[in-house]
Amino acid sequence: MNTDKLVGDLLHAHGLRKTQIRVEIIQQFMESDFGLRASEIINSLKANHDRVTVYRALNSFEENGIIHKASEDANGVKYALCGNECSSDHHEDTHAHFVCDECQNTFCLDDVKIPQPKVSDELTVNQVTFTINGICKECKA
Ligand SMILES: [Zn+2]
Ligand SMILES: [Zn+2]
Ligand SMILES: [Zn+2]
């Protein structure tokens, strides 16, 4: 599959210019079954890139509805690709995430929708997170 074209279209749809580093990062997400940390992405990039460039790309992806935070721990945030319904205006990732206690891999549970709690009008909700910890299929086997 020509993912280069696919990634170019994705960037374009979210109002971002196509650059080599952006394409490489998104390809990593497409090839991974679980959430990725910035440090993991930096380690598997083909060419050497400035860390700051990678962090900046991840921030712009999150702001533009391409990736979302899947989990967060002492070692940092793990991101996952968004579905088609996310846009530059807002994210629609109202699903739970599963974090394996053994391998630490994080998965999107797209089918497990989380309720959006009602809060006082004085508060603005940006994101509701729901994390399930346990043992994944691979570690159980
Ligand atoms: Zn999203
Ligand atoms: Zn596991
Ligand atoms: Zn997710």
Image (spheres, rainbow, N blue to C red):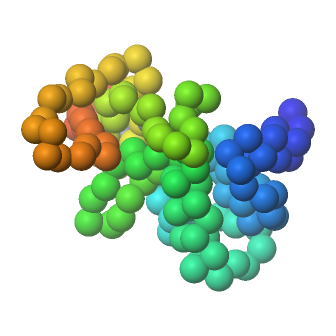
Q: Quadrant of ligand 2?
A: top left
In the image, is residue 135 above or below residue 12?
above
Q: How many marks?
A: 0
Q: Nearer the viewer, residue 22 or 48?
A: 22
Could you say which quadrant of the image residue 50 lies in? bottom right
Q: Percent from the top left, x then y, of residue 62?
A: 51, 53
Residue found at the very far top of the displayed protein:
111
In the image, is residue 60 above or below residue 65?
below
* Observer able to see residue 43: no
- Residue drawn at x 31%, y 46% is 126
- Residue drawn at x 58%, y 60% is 60
Q: Is residue 9 left or right of residue 38?
A: right
Q: Is residue 91 left or right of residue 95?
A: right
Could you say which quadrant of the image residue 77 lies in? bottom left
- Residue drawn at x 36%, y 29% is 94
In the image, is residue 52 above or below residue 140?
below
- Residue drawn at x 26%, y 39% is 128
Q: Nearer the viewer, residue 37 or 6?
A: 6
In the image, is residue 62 above or below residue 89?
below
Q: Percent from the top left, x then y, of residue 41?
A: 59, 62
Q: Nearer the viewer, residue 103 or 115?
A: 115
Q: Is residue 26 left or right of residue 79?
A: right
Quarter containing the C terminus: top left
